[in-house]
Every structure is written in structure tokens, then in C-alpha cells.
Amino acid sequence: MKYIVLFFLIFSSYFANAQNIDSNLIRYTLSNSLKSKESILVNNLYSNMGYSPIWIGEQNQHKTKELLLALKNPLFNYKEKDLGQKEIERLMFMIDNGTEENKAELLARLDVALSDSFVKLVKFIYVGDVDWNMVKDKISSLKQSDGTNASWEMQQKEFPNQNALADAVAQGKIEDYLVSLIPLEDKYRTFINIYDKYRKLKPFNEIPYSYDDLQLGSNSPRVMLVKKRLQDLGDYPSHLPLDNNFDNSLREAVLNFQKRFNLEETGIFDRVTNYYLNTTLSTYLKIIATNLDKTKIYPKKLNEQRIEINIPSYSLTYYENGKSSLNTKVVLGRIDRPTPIMNENIEYMVLNPTWTVTDNLIKKDLIGVLREEPNYLKEHNIRVFAGNDEIELEPNQLDEYENSSAKVPYRFVQDPGSKNVLGQVKFAFPNNHDVFLHDTDNKDLFNRRYRVYSSGCIRTQKPLEIAKILLETRTAGKYNKNKMQEILDSNKTATIKFDKSVPINILYFTVSKNKDKVHFDYDIYMYDQIIQESSEGNKKPYFEIPKQRMIKIEKKTEKDEEPAP
């Protein structure tokens, strides 16, 4: 970047020559010197500007300075990509060391090179360098390769409006325009701050593994290494000594680190904690950059009033007027039945809901359960219908459908009550996956760390709190907490349509910040890895599910094995 720095020192000599660059020279340069994937966009920019020089010339000094600073600003170019900076440096060197005869030509080439870099920077900020169509294809193909029915509804953005881009150039408001392009800005800026923090850290040396755990009272040279690493990461206070004694301060630091990585919180430095503490600086930066990449498929901001589900953190947040007003745990889809990622609208809720077993779950789960437990339907208040007629069904009547593509000709409906898998309330947002947000009769799952036990639906720990908020804000005063309780006590099903739908955003971010602590969540569905392998310079045509995961999902109980959405 040394010539870009020198650019500011010697720019005045370029201004004097700007008048020698006319529209014909710019046109000639575009036709004969521009070798770029973005040549059409660059040509369009000059067409909008009347083929006048955009960056060279005294009147352009301020916006050119803004562009050059933006190209090396992590806020815009966090991957430190070469967006044409090397070509700019090369041309500056040639101008500095060339003759007067060809200076106008070189200045025209420099002007076009700066425009090319500007267009590339705009594209990186707004669109990114991930092939999101490749990501979608890889996620969809998991069904064929691994039997996983996964879905992420996303849309690759197009280049932003070119008239707005030309207006920003004409007005000289380069930085303001680039900021206006930042997607999901609050989250993006949080990630940038985290990225900046980790970028400034010195590379780590690996802490040796040992079969002997370190815990309160331990004395070992490894303790000093652990203290130093946790101090670098901000878990162990900087004013405390780096010695070999495992004291209470280190125990608190280990607990804090384990919490930030969703590990078992023991305060003991075991092999699992050792593994995560050995995370390299380059890995941290790659994870954070991947989360920045994911913002590119979203708008500037989400709705001020919304329900936000983040899959890797197994969390639900309700936002009112852009502020978080409720946080709770959720249970999500199993690894082989992942919760689909989408943006929808909750249109109504059902109190004391019935549950109709989907055709997919009849074949995958219910038939097998009935083979082992013939009385399962009766014990769980599930009735069977053929058309509108309730019938008695022998389990062997379903055998022919277990591995068939034919639809099961019966409806299995679970009545409201304490055994209903949807609990007391469900929130419906019409979608292509038969997924909804609901209560559950299996509350124990909320105590587990990796809460992936459903068939794709989202189970929430605080359904009645959510219901109360939505009744107060979305039914124009027709319902309140007392009315809701009256309906629940009746055990009768009631559908309540909202006056205004509630946006629900199902997201997948593995990095977050809570009370100044950076949390890294496990890439449970491996989508981060898919994204990394679909990025420019690192594209791989296929994705293979790893045979081993670095987490241990608690074993299912008999209750967990029952059919459930």
C-alpha cells in the first residue's frame, strides 16, 4: 500500500494533468485497457457520468481519498481482498517514473482502475464473495447424500441500483454511500468489532494436551500457559499473576470460557476445554468472517417488531421497537431433520391445539413405534380418521406404507391435553415445510446444551409469555392474559388470528456478543463449513458430512423417541 500512501503526497501533480483526460481517452481506455469481470458495471458508471474522469482532477480529491481509505478499511473490506489495489499501485509507480508523453494515458488508466476498484468494493459490501446458489445446492443435496432434509431459503443479491451509485459518485459521498450498503448493520458492526479485536491478537502457541485434568489446587507449568491464553482472550483478568497455581480466579476464567463456547461448565481444564482453547487465531478470524458473509443475504435491518430464532445458540428473542424484550431457550430440529432457515410471518396462534401427525412422521416414526407399542395411540390420546370417520386401526394396516411414496390414507389426530406434543399453544406461520413454533410436553430438553431433538419445528421454553405479548399487541384489545387462561382451562381448541402478522426470522449465526463477552457456538448443521467451501478462492463442488462431530449430544430418552414435530 506504500504507493497509495504516497498518492496523497504527490496527488497535486496529477491534478495539473487532469485537463488532458477527455471523454474520448476514457472511452478508449475502457475499450482497450479494462480487463475486469466488472467491466460492464464500470462502463455503465462512466456512461452515467458522461465519460468524464471520476477520480483524477482537483475537484475529485476528496472522494478519491475516501475511496482509497475505504479499500483498506476493515469495515468495508474485512477480508483484506485485493480489489484492484495492486493495479492502482502499479499505475502510480508507472506515472511516478514515466515520461510526460504517456502521462495522460496512464492517468486515464488510473481513473478507470479506481472505478473498477470502487465497483468491486461496492459488490463485496453488498453482495459478498460467497456463491449463495452453490450453498443452497449443497444444503439441498444433503438429502441425497446423507438423508438429511435440509433447507435454507435465501436469495443471492444483485448489484445495487446503478443510478444511486452514480449519484453517490457525482455528489462525492463515497463513504456515506458505502455505509448505506452495509447489510444487517447492527449485527454486522458487532461482528466487525469482534473481528478487529481478534485481528489484533498475537498468534497462539498450542497448549500441550494431557490426560491429567487441571483443576482447583493443581500446580503445573501448563497452568501458566492456560492463564496466559485466557488472559489474551479476556477471560482471565490482565492484572492477575501468570503463575503455575490453579486458583479460584483461574477457575472462574475457565468457567467463563466454557460458557462462551457452550461447553460443560465445570471449571475444570479438561481435554475438551483444551481443544477449544487451542483454537487458532486464523480459525477465529475465519469463523467471524463467515458470520459477516452471512449478513449479505439480509437487508439493511430486520423488522422492529419480530421474533428471531438463532439456531446455533438455540435461542429465541422477541423484539419490540427494535429492542429485545424477551429471551428464551428453544429446541430445534435434529441433525438429520434440521429446522429450515427462512423468514416468514406468524399469522395466528392456537390455544389447546390438536396435532395432526404428518405423513412423513407417520412413516419415519409412528409405524415403528406402533410395532413396538400397539397401545401407543390410546395411551397418547391419538385418534385415527379415514376421511371424516373415526376408525379403529390395527398397526399392521400401516406396514405397506412405511417405505412407500404413497400417502398414508389415514389422519392421526392427537387431542388437546397434558400429553399433546404441542403443549398448550402453537404459533403458525404458513410455510413450505410444515414447521411452526410451539409449546412442548417434554420440558426436560431445555436443560440440555445441544438442543436438537425435534423433527424441524421449534419448541419454546416460554410459550405463554410469547402468547401474552402477542395477544396484547396483535389483537386490538380483544384478548388479555385472563381471557387466555380461561380458554386454556377449558381445554377447548381456540384459534386466534392476529390483526397484524408477526415477522419471524430463523437465522444461523455462530458468533454473538452478550454483555461484552464474545460467544462462539458450534456449527451444528455444518452450514458455516458449507459457506466457507462456497466462497471465492475456496470453492469445492461437493460437501461431505464429517464422520465425527466434536460434540456429544445427550442420548435420547424413551420420551424423545416418540413421534413429535
Image: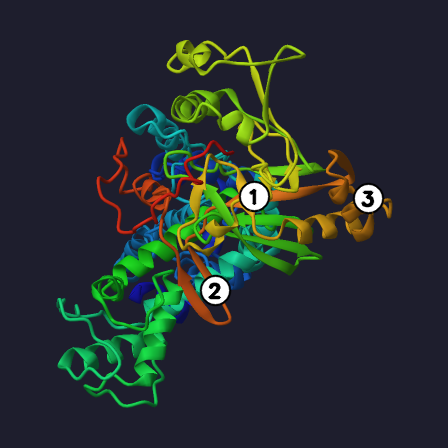
Q: Which residue is found at the position 45% from the left and 23% from the top? A: 374
Element class at badge 1: loop
Q: Nearer the viewer, mark 3 or mark 2?
A: 3
Q: Earlier in the sequence, mark 1 or mark 3?
A: 1
Q: Earlier in the sequence, mark 2 or mark 1?
A: 1
Kindly identify which numbered label has been placed on residue 475: 3
CA separation in Å, label 1 and label 3: 24 Å
Seen from the viewer's position, the closer of residues 321 and 20 is: 321
Kindly identify which numbered label has been placed on residue 513: 2
Q: Quadrant of residue 520?
A: bottom left
Kindly identify which numbered label has been placed on residue 419: none
Apparent side of residue 499 relative to residue 522 in the rendered image (left or right)? right
Q: Amino acid at mark 2?
A: Lys
- Could you tell me residue 61's position as x and y percent? 50, 63
Q: Nearer the viewer, mark 2 or mark 1?
A: 1
Marks 3 and 2: CB-CB under 8 Å? Answer: no
Q: Which residue is mark 1?
A: 440
Marks 2 and 1: CB-CB under 8 Å? Answer: no
Seen from the viewer's position, the closer of residues 138 and 316 is: 316
- Could you tell me residue 523's position as x and y percent? 36, 49
Element class at badge 2: strand
Apparent side of residue 534 relative to residue 493 in the rendered image (left or right)? left
- Could you tell me residue 512's position as x and y percent? 46, 60
Seen from the viewer's position, the closer of residues 157 and 239 is: 239
CA separation in Å, label 2 and label 1: 29 Å
CA separation in Å, label 3 and label 2: 34 Å
Q: Amino acid at mark 1?
A: Thr
